[in-house]
Image: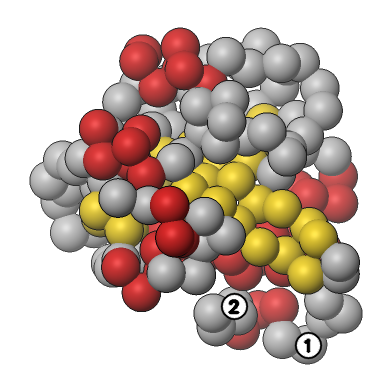
């Protein structure tokens, strides 16, 4: 996975690595609905501490397939209405991901808790032995009609069980 150029001159922290992963997820994902070529992607952060929010500011204004990214830091219990991507940091107020998926089927959910995918999220990041890895909830992505590059899916921890 390639990294974001804005991160190249800074020490690579776990938060910055998460940002690079998320950026690549966005580059290799097609949303289920048609969008105007220049319509923005609103990336919303839930439970974000200052370090995570600061790291994600590297994405502000970057483009994915012609769509500029706008970053929003959500407060506790703040609705995800208007968001296209929801990054949920472990901790804070629990979020019912299955209910969120039902209410907003075109919302791509990414998180970093160990049980994120099992709890109903789309893509879960996992820090293990000094490395960042990810797993995907393929049935959920398929149901929501997200199309993610097969090359990216092959890199998932649970790639062998995807069908």
Name the spot of residue 27 as percent of width and height, x first: 38, 67
What separation in Å lies between label 1 and label 2 (alpha carbons)?
10 Å
Which residue is under mark 2?
A: 4
The quarter holding residue 151 reads bottom left
For image coordinates 35% across by 21% down, the residue present is: 104
Q: Is residue 41 above or below residue 99?
A: below
The quadrant the N terminus occupies is bottom right
Q: Is residue 102 above or below residue 67?
A: above
Which residue is under mark 1?
A: 9
Looking at the image, tell me whether mark 1 or mark 2 is earlier in sequence order. Answer: 2
- Crowding at label 2, few (<14), some or many (≥20) Cα neighbours within 10 Å? some
- Crowding at label 1, few (<14), some or many (≥20) Cα neighbours within 10 Å? few
**SS for callout 2:** loop
Q: Is residue 77 above or below residue 134?
A: above
User: Which residue occupies the foreground of this view, 139 or 15?
Assistant: 139
Residue extending farthest bottom: 9
The quarter holding residue 106 reads top left
Q: Is residue 98 above or below residue 40?
A: above
* Label placed on residue 135: none
């Amino acid at each position: 996975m390639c990294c974001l150029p804005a991160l190249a001159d800074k020490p690579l922290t776990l938060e910055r690595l998460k940002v690079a992963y998320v950026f690549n997820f966005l580059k290799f994902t097609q949303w289920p609905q048609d969008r105007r070529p220049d319509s923005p992607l609103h990336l919303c952060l839930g439970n974000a501490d200052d370090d995570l929010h600061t790291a994600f500011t590297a994405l502000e204004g970057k483009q994915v397939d012609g769509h500029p990214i706008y970053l929003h830091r959500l407060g506790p219990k703040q609705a995800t209405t208007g968001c296209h991507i929801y990054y949920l940091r472990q901790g804070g107020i629990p979020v019912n991901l299955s209910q969120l998926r039902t209410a907003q089927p075109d919302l791509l959910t990414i998180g970093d808790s160990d049980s994120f995918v099992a709890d109903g999220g789309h893509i879960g990041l996992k820090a293990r032995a000094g490395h960042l890895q990810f797993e995907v909830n393929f049935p959920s992505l398929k149901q929501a009609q997200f199309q993610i590059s097969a090359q990216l899916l092959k890199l998932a921890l649970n790639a062998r069980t995807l069908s």
